[in-house]
Image (cartoon, grey):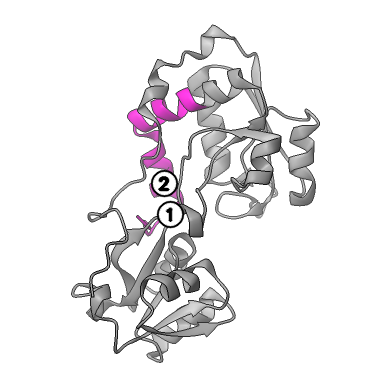
């Protein structure tokens, strides 16, 4: 059985989703005095409050680096998740950096920058099985998945001959792998990376990352009010600069100790 599913990943591959053509976009064509970022405080490790109440996370650091690159003033304000999109639509901010899904419905309300981080699916196995892992050899194995997830759908669609065992949560599915009641896990690589970081002596990623936007989503991008091209282009330009100068790699390695690419 041949499974041609993904873009290859080599060792500690770092994310690179920025559009090189954005280098030609000069934000100074339409100057912007500041970028008012909106976010939430309930999406660790992207945007959340630490023990002292300070807003921190990958997205928070990225927003500040974007403003520094464009050389404009920057504010970051946290809103409840159920209100933050409406706040952006009501001009309470210039950009939303909080993992808003790139759905057709949101596309009618907002414009989006280039994706700055995709969230692939990945297999996790016990360490002794990781080096020789081959998805084509899973026919007599059991793969743990979260019940009803897009990753369970992926297994049914692309590896229908592989037995899967569904669990209510990803953590329970990963714990089944650790306990030996499943031979592998397939699910969201970002969330799995934090579990692996707590179980380094047991398990690790195996094989390649699988990018399937139709199933796993387009990834993370910054939303701006529709028609606000100056802000969107400034952010896209900054993202390319931050990729080129290594800042995006630095932030990725800081916030994701076990890389999921």
Q: Is residue 250 magenta?
A: yes
Q: Quadrant of residue 30?
A: top right
From which residue to which does the magenta span run? 236-261
Q: Is residue 133 above or below residue 60?
A: below
Foreground residue, 188 or 44?
A: 188
Callout 2–callout 1 Cβ contact below 8 Å: yes
Q: Is residue 115 above or below residue 19?
A: below
Residue 196 position within the rendered picture, expressed as x and y whole percent measured from the top left: 40, 69
Q: Is residue 241 magenta?
A: yes
Give the prevailing secondary structure in the magenta stretch. Answer: helix
Of all residues shown, which one is farthest toward the left? 132
Label 1 sits on a secondary structure element that is: loop
Residue 147 position within the rendered picture, expressed as x and y whole percent measured from the top left: 56, 78
Query: Residue at image x 46%, y 45%?
Result: 117
Label 2 sits on a secondary structure element that is: helix
Residue 77 position within the rendered picture, expressed as x and y whole percent measured from the top left: 72, 36
Gap in angstroms between the C-alphas marked 2 and 1: 6 Å
Q: Quadrant of residue 249?
A: top left
Relative placement, left or right, of 144 versus 46 is left
Residue labelled with disc 2: 252
Residue labelled with disc 1: 256
Q: Quadrant of the C terminus?
A: bottom left
Of all residues shown, which one is farthest toward the bottom? 181
Foreground residue, 44 or 177?
A: 177
Q: Is residue 79 above or below residue 127?
A: above
């Amino acid at each position: 059985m041949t499974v041609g599913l993904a873009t290859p990943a080599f060792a500690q591959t770092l994310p690179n989703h920025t559009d090189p053509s954005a280098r030609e976009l000069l934000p100074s064509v339409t100057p912007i005095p500041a970028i008012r970022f909106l976010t939430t405080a309930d999406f660790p490790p992207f945007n959340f409050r630490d023990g002292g109440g300070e807003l921190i996370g990958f997205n928070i650091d990225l927003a500040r680096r974007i403003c520094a690159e464009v050389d404009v003033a920057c504010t970051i304000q946290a809103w409840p998740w159920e209100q933050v999109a409406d706040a952006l639509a009501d001009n309470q901010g210039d950009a939303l950096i909080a993992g808003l899904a790139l759905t057709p419905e949101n596309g009618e309300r907002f414009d989006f920058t280039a994706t700055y981080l995709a969230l692939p699916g990945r297999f996790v196995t016990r360490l002794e099985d990781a080096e020789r892992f081959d998805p084509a050899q899973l026919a007599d194995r059991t793969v743990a998945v979260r019940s009803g997830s897009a990753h369970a759908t992926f297994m049914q669609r692309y590896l229908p001959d592989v037995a899967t065992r569904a669990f209510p949560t990803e953590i329970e599915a990963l714990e089944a792998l650790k306990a030996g009641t499943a031979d592998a896990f397939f699910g969201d690589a970002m969330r799995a990376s934090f579990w692996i970081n707590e179980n380094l002596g047991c398990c690790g990623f195996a094989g390649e990352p699988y990018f399937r936007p139709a199933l796993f989503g387009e990834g993370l991008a910054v939303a701006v009010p529709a028609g606000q091209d100056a802000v969107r282009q400034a952010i896209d330009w900054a993202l390319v600069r931050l990729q080129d100068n290594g800042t995006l790699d630095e932030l990725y390695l800081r916030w994701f100790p076990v890389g999921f690419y």
